[in-house]
Amino acid sequence: MEKIAVISGASSGIGKETALLLAKSGYRVFGLNRTASDISGVEFVKTDITDNESIKSAIAYIAAKVGRIDLLVNNAGMGISGSIEHTPSERAAYIFDVNFFGAFELTKAALPHMKKSGGRIINVSSLAAVIYLPFQGFYSATKAAVNLLFSALQLEVKPFGISVTNVMPGDIKTGFTSNRRKNEDDEGDYAERIKKSVAVMEKDEQRGMPPSAVAACILKQAKARKPRLNVAVGGKYKIIAFLAKILPSGLINKLIYAIYGG
């Protein structure tokens, strides 16, 4: 039987590579985006991930067309950089709307249609959920919130045969870097440190793994007999995630500050 996959933010980067790989692997793929993109094998449904009614309408359309959802990939996301002190409240709220509440609302709408066959929910989280960086605090906060919310969810939906995986990439070379929103008000006492810190982040991202590496991890977890709850992507990042668990917090702080904060 053909499996049905729904993925948010499928028009570029990790989302596009994942949609393409799923389509090539036999899934019928629905991509949820604000604007349609011409990607072979992907059926686009116009959706604003920050609009609950738009999400409900999209899922209702898919359910009416195919009757069920076997795989949900919460991929849509965005980043902001800047000091916590100077981040406007509306910008902080917006990143949570996209990264956290978007995944929550989309999952809530999809769950009734996943219980029919048992399904899989895969979130594109981030290593930033466990390794916090200065001047990226809100991004880390959204991804940590996703990890914890969906870790709780996997216990709630287990009796329905639904599994949850949080995929945590490190540095990925995508348009995410150029699309990151920067605080215009960060001047004076933070300005030089922010400039240096963000430059290091962006350099690392442009040297990072291709988005296809994350797509391959998503497909592996989608097909796994026993999918894992939290998965770091890439050998280097698996080591970093492991060290974050075992090293003293004081040492971790010292290392992060030396690289990004000083």
Image: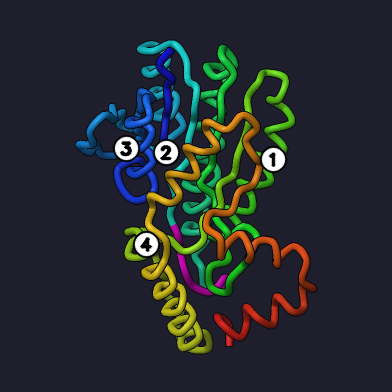
Q: Which residues are magenta?
A: 79-85
Q: Are marks 3 and 2 in contact (CB under 8 Å)?
A: no
The residue tagged 4 is 173
Q: Secondary structure at mark 1?
A: helix
In the rendered image, the vertical position of residue 36 relative to residue 128, given as above or below: above
Q: Secondary structure at mark 4?
A: loop
The quadrant in which the N terminus is found is top left
The residue tagged 2 is 49
The residue tagged 3 is 20
Name the residue type under label 2: Ile
Name the residue type under label 3: Leu
Across and down, in percent, residue 164 comes to 62, 35
- Marks 3 and 2, how far apart at CA: 21 Å
Comparing 175 with 2, the one in front is 2
Going from N to C along the chain, the mark reached first, 3 or 2, is: 3
Q: Residue furthest left?
A: 38
- Marks 4 and 1, how far apart at CA: 27 Å
Name the residue type under label 4: Lys
Name the residue type under label 1: Ser
Going from N to C along the chain, the mark reached first, 1 or 2, is: 2
Q: Which mark is residue 186?
A: none
Residue lying at 55% horizontally and 45% vertically, measured from the top left:
100
Going from N to C along the chain, the mark reached first, 4 or 2, is: 2
The residue tagged 1 is 151
